[in-house]
Amino acid sequence: MKVLSVASEVYPLIKTGGLADVAGALPAALSTHGVDMQVLLPGYQQVMAKLRNPVPLVKFDDLLGVSATILTSTIDGVEYLILDAPDLFDREGGPYTDAANADHRDNWLRFAALSRAAANIAEGAIEDWTPDIVHAHDWQAGLTPVYIKQGKASATPTVMTIHNIAFQGQFGPDIFPKLGLPQSVFSVDGVEYYGDVSFLKGGLQMATAITTVSPTYAQEIRTPDFGMGLDGLINARAASLHGIVNGIDPDVWDPSTDQMIAANYSLAKPKKRHANRKALAEYFSFPDTEKPVFTVVSRLTWQKGIDVLTELVDDIVAMGGRLAVLGSGDKALETALLQAAERHPGDIGLVIGYDEPLSHLMQAGGDVILVPSRFEPCGLTQLYGLRYGNVPVVARTGGLADTIIDANEAASAAQVATGFQFSPVTPDALREALRRAVRAFSEPKVWAQLQSQGMNADVSWDRSALRYANLYAELLTATSETT
């Protein structure tokens, strides 16, 4: 079975968040189920610099007005398809923003071109490799199902995955004539959304199937509180909606082999974890004591509940804990955390930005990973925490609720607890969860049991990859029955 995956970022070539990890891990996870998945992503500067002996496959003289080439390149045994369009992607900054952190003004064109190229591949543009299924990720690939539905490959089944419904790719109506789509598509049954064009809405409307990255989030987005204005559409398509929880790449996130941490360890040899705890303390200039270290690796935003956390930094220190934060985002939240670090030198540490090796060390050396998100489609941070013995404290929402078993009395007695949940996302509720974690940490046997249960949890792609493979097979069967 041949599947084309379309994504705006793919680890290890380019990453700003969890989407990259998912898009990067799926091909290998699905290969054991007979799925040949190729990933198409944009040729950003960062991506082009990592290519080795790229081979041109398809040349476009006019891809929505620009010249472009689809390249193939194999890196570390993985084959990638790269949309090399210098006019669109050869520029400074990140995938979506410029060097000043402002959105690229032509993001609509950049990602419409990605989707149009994907549709061309579905129509047979690559000799000897035409996909049976096309799988699009988030709004940046949202027009993929639209172009396919309106083109020569209209019978090709498509899957639209929502990683975060809050980001919808909404642009003014003036761009529609430049998309190369029939006028009929600018309608309530197409890409039109309150007079604008919504890439995600179009994809959700026209995809054969819709998936989200956890079962709970699949239900949450059917409500006004979580649906971000698209709950009506999601409910109308409920029969085609599937919640499939994310996994993590066990080759990248494995404390027994991870080269980014100070010392390797495992469930069988947990004492070696202490060297990472010491290295983390040295990095953040914490005195090497036995105080619990709370870690945060996150975008510093309202969605992630960081505003609630900032209200409790003094409480964490008063409880006898320390806080290490890695992330960037809202300037007011960054400032609040910087001020907290100044108030509590030696107890609170902050790194503004993103550092992949440091994120690994924080999982390996931290005691508690905090994920107080107001909504979280799946979340990978808590899964990394489980794998590394960094006990999660999470809000009871989305994938956090699906992947962490609260250490209540029953779960603890049954020895299945893996962390601490709290709800609602308020200072009082989070404070109580922190207190529960500190109490458990003060009992070494209880804490070791929690860590052990978390490290034993299956956070791989095995079960989820099988669900995707089964979904693809069902779509192909349904298509063959109707053609």
Image (cartoon, rainbow, N blue to C red):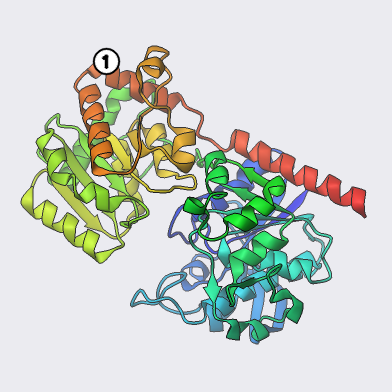
Query: Element under label 1?
Result: helix
Q: Position of residue 204 (x, y in %)?
A: 65, 59
Q: Is residue 164 above or below residue 272?
A: below
At x 27% / y 15%, what residue is drawn?
A: 445
Q: Is residue 155 above or below residue 264?
A: below
Numbered disc total:
1
One can see residue 52 in this view: no
Q: Position of residue 269 (x, y in %)?
A: 35, 22
Residue 158 as seen in the image, left or right of residue 176: right
Quadrant occupied by the C terminus: bottom right
Residue 157 as seen in the image, left or right of residue 376: right
Q: Position of residue 159 (x, y in %)?
A: 69, 54
Find residue 74 and report its image quarter. Answer: bottom right
Disc 1 residue type?
Answer: Lys
Q: Position of residue 27 (x, y in %)?
A: 63, 48
Find residue 333 and report its image quarter. Answer: bottom left
- Identify the residue position indicated by label 1 in the image: 445
One can see residue 399 in this view: yes
Residue 347 as seen in the image, left or right of residue 199: left
At x 57% / y 73%, what residue is drawn?
A: 194
* Nearest to the observer: residue 259 or residue 460: 460
Q: Residue furthest top?
A: 413
At x 52% / y 81%, what residue is drawn?
A: 106
Instruction: Count residues near mark 1 (Cα–Cα under 10 Å), then give few for <14, some for 14-19, many for 20+.
Output: few
Q: Is residue 61 above or below residue 89?
A: below
